[in-house]
Amino acid sequence: MIDAVVTLLQNDATLAAILTGGVHRAVEISRQETPGAFDNNRELLPCALVKQESATSWGPHPHSGRLYIAVWFYQRRGYDAVEAARKRVYQLLHRRKLMPGDGSGCYEMRHAGDLLDAEEAELGVSMAMSRYVATVERR
């Protein structure tokens, strides 16, 4: 399921124009893990990191569940790219049905909340996060 989300976000031209450092599926944004998120001067470009948070059983069906996904947005200073990207991801994911690569179903994704105007202390950059919950078929 997470791969379907990442692929959708990576293939959106509007989002790519905002997040010139890309959309990544990694442990963290760093020069080692996500070198494409940095320019030739080793400065952070506007980018996003997509991570699974947790999976739970849910619903009346024996194989249904919920998958919680966080999209972390970063930029060097300010929040203009972070906000534009956050709004675009909302347009792409909220109330969306995605087909995971393993053939399991996704009944619907919904926006669950945002962390706004934050700072990532280790990198010293602006940050925001959007959380989504997908009701899925668990296999």
Image: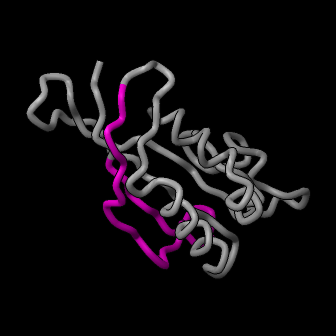
Q: Is residue 42 magenta?
A: no
In this rendering, would 56 be left or right of 42?
left
Q: Residue at x 57, y 50 (%)?
A: 49
Residue 89 in picture, x, y percent from top left? 54, 60
> Which image quarter: residue 116?
bottom left
Range covered by the magenta-colored residues: 105-133
Residue 117 in picture, x, y percent from top left? 49, 79
Q: Residue at x 71, y 41 (%)?
A: 32
Count the marks: 0
Above or below for 133 versus 105: below
Residue 45 in picture, x, y percent from top left? 75, 63
Above or below for 105 versus 72: above
Q: Residue at x 61, y 64 (%)?
A: 74
Q: How is the image coloured?
A: one colour
In this rendering, would 59 be left or right of 121?
left
In this rendering, would 124 be left or right of 116?
right
> Which quadrant: the C terminus?
top left
Out of 8 and 39, give the one closest to the viewer. Answer: 8
Residue 94 in picture, x, y percent from top left? 41, 57
In this rendering, would 84 be left or right of 44?
left
Q: Residue at x 30, y 34 (%)?
A: 136
Q: Is residue 108 magenta?
A: yes
Out of 96 and 56, give the one closest to the viewer. Answer: 96
Q: Residue furthest left?
A: 60
The kind of secondary structure the magenta stretch mainly shows is strand
Above or below for 136 versus 93: above
> Which image quarter: residue 33?
top right
> Which quadrant: the N terminus?
top left
